[in-house]
Image: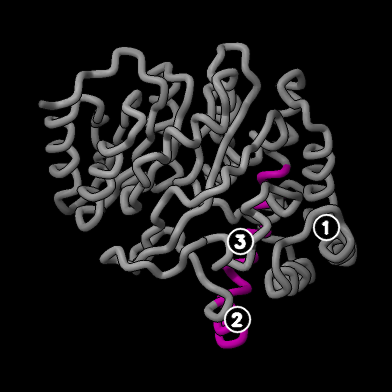
Amino acid sequence: MPPEPVAEPAVCILVATCDGADFVDAQLQSLRAQTEADWIALVSDDASVDNTLQIVLRHAAEDPRIVVLDAHARRQGIRANFARLMAAALAQGAPLFALCDQDDLWDPEKIARLRAALGAEAEEASAAPALAYADLRLVGEQGALLAASHFEHAGARNVKAGIGPWLLAHNLIPGCTLLGNRALLELAHPIPPGVFHHDWWILLVAAAAGRVVAVDGVLTSYRQHRANAIGAAGSRLRSLRFFRAFPSQLRAARRQYAFAVVQAEALIELARSRPLCFTQAVWLDRAQAVHDGLGASNPVRRVCAALCGPVSRLGFARNVLFVAIALLPLERAVARRS
């Protein structure tokens, strides 16, 4: 028998799909196998040209907890797709929300453990913004284990224990591992113009306005394949790319540098408009340092900020790129704001 519909679900899972027919069936099966049954999954398909939508609709017919939004007629992109899902989650009214990619696999106890880590008070209407995350294992296209820990594989073992100032410079926590509360969703939505990574933005808002909890454990199989929007690279691969493809690595890191400056400004502006919501002053001070230092028009000031400022990236190679980018002219998106 299919499960009963959830009248007032505790968790709203936001599932973004786009040409994911090879993997979405397994992902939806992993959602339906959760030990925590008190959820609803909102699915937004971004104009898939394969049979992704048909697979999703089949699951929705079998399980009333899966609700399919009207598909986009034209492709909108990952950021816009998740922004749409965030708005739909607010309308749904669930006290908790989780981001979900189409190609991963969730461990059966994932929702239950993240929900327990946040605690019951996080679900109250008066709660401050709160977010929990856990580690991931890396698997191949067919599910074969590639690495037991994403954070260790990425050379960022300390991310297992919690976040730090590096979060303003780059993000090593994939959105598919996050569970946040309604207070966070209300504060992070809408995503400001110029902010490219929805998950990075949500994490920053949680850090600056509330609390971020690191859960000790691996709760997601993070699938790696050629079509990944954002994948994971190990230390050897990063080193190889660093030396063999430095120009392309520099271009990618330069975009991240620009995103960091624009996002820091957006965080400051949001805090000014909602001052009572932002309780972690140290994060706003760091955001100001990123905006004023890394976004400065003077390259010497940018380099000083990259070398000696309160925010740095994790890993030697990442910081070498960070300083190299600071020497280059600012990208136009940043220059317009400096």
Q: Is residue 220 left or right of residue 164?
A: left
**Callout 2 secondary element:** helix
- Frontmost of labels 3 and 2 is 2
Is 124 placed above or below 212 here? above
What is the spatial separation of the Cα atoms under label 3 and label 1, in whole angstroms? Answer: 17 Å
Range covered by the magenta-colored residues: 238-264
Residue named by callout 3: 255
Question: Image point 19% across, 52% down: which residue?
Answer: 49
Choose the circle earlier in sequence order: 3 or 2.
2
**The N terminus lies in quadrant:** top left
Choose the circle earlier in sequence order: 1 or 2.
2
Which mark identifies residue 297?
Answer: 1
- The amino acid type found where label 2 is placed reads Ser
Question: Image point 41% across, 70% down: which residue?
Answer: 146
Q: Is residue 211 left or right of residue 140?
A: right
* Residue 260 drawn in magenta: yes
For residue 99, what is the image quadrant?
top left
Which mark identifies residue 274?
Answer: none
Residue named by callout 2: 239
Q: Kindly indicate whether the residue at mark 2 contacts the one at mark 1 (C-beta within 8 angstroms).
A: no
What is the spatial separation of the Cα atoms under label 3 and label 2, in whole angstroms? Answer: 19 Å
- The amino acid type found where label 1 is placed reads Ser
Closest to the observer, 26 or 45:
26
Question: Image point 58% across, 75% down: which residue?
Answer: 235
Q: Position of residue 274 (x, y in %)?
A: 71, 21
For residue 14, what is the image quadrant?
top left
Q: Is residue 148 left or right of residue 145?
A: right
- Frontmost of labels 3 and 1 is 3
Choose the circle earlier in sequence order: 3 or 1.
3
Is 155 placed above or below 159 here? below
Is 36 placed above or below 220 here? above
